[in-house]
Amino acid sequence: MNKTRHEEFREYVTARGPALLRQAMQLTSDRAEAEDLLQAALAKTYLAWDRIHDRAAVDGYVRRAMANTQISWWRRRKLEIYPTDELPDQPVDDHTRRTELHDALGRALDRLPARQRLAVMLRYYEDMPESEIAEVLGVSVGTVKSTVSRAVAKLRDDAGLGGDFPDVPSQQP
């Protein structure tokens, strides 16, 4: 791989790394495993970089590499775990609260107008800068900022989030 392509790959990882890590977190539910998964997928992508001619398809390639790698790891791990008659003495984390909060946030996002929901998803889920969001939505950067600001304010004031989760801080007076 020549120096230009090496720099191009480095720029890609710098720009898309946080969004890809969030996607890896969705696959693994563990930060350390997500980092390992992303690193393995990026290593595979680096080796195939010269064969990926459509740079717009790189995200899909990395996501597919993450999914395939996670499936391989899961299959390998499945062989290492054997059932037993004795239960382990280690406590297991209860992720119910996090799942409930995730579901409530999803419902709150669904209650936003489509344009606000899209702006929030692009900004915080895809980690896109305002200038790129403005390009995608065909509006000015100022419009993106105000749209995201209004959407976040609505989410803060959403009774569905605060009512179900009293220990989650609310911005209501």
Image: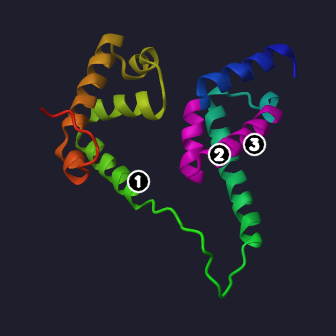
Residue linked to disc 2: 32
Which badge, 1 or 3, comes first in the chain's sequence?
A: 3
Q: Between residues 15 and 54, which one lies in front from this camera angle?
A: 15
User: Which residue is depicted at the point 74% across and 59% down?
Assistant: 72
What is the C-alpha distance between the residues marked 1 and 3? Answer: 27 Å
Say few, some or many: other residues with alpha carbon within 10 Å of mark 2 (under 14 / 14 to 19 / 20 or more): few
Residue linked to disc 1: 98
Vertical position of residue 58 compared to residue 70: above or below:
above
Vertical position of residue 89 compared to residue 159: above or below:
below
Which badge, 2 or 3, comes first in the chain's sequence?
A: 2
Q: Of all residues shown, which one is farthest toward the right? A: 1
Q: Quadrant of the C terminus?
A: top left
Toward which corner of the image does residue 135 lie, by quadrant? top left
What is the C-alpha distance between the residues marked 2 and 3? Answer: 12 Å
Q: Circle 3 sits in a helix, a strand or a loop, which is it?
A: helix
Percent x, y of residue 153: 23, 29
Viewer-nearest of discs 1 and 3:
1
Residue linked to disc 3: 40
Q: Disc 2 residue type?
A: Ala
Say few, some or many: other residues with alpha carbon within 10 Å of mark 1 (under 14 / 14 to 19 / 20 or more): few
User: Which residue is depicted at the point 73% across and 58% down?
Assistant: 73
Range of magenta residues: 18-47
Toward which corner of the image does residue 57 lie, by quadrant? top right
Which badge, 2 or 1, comes first in the chain's sequence?
A: 2
Percent x, y of residue 23: 56, 43
Q: Does the magenta stretch include residue 65?
A: no
Q: In the displayed structure, does residue 6 sit left or right of residue 151?
A: right
Q: In which quarter of the image is the N terminus?
A: top right
Vertical position of residue 67 compared to residue 132: above or below:
below
Q: Disc 3 residue type?
A: Ala
Q: Disc 1 residue type?
A: Arg
Contact? badges 2 and 3 (CB < 8 Å): no
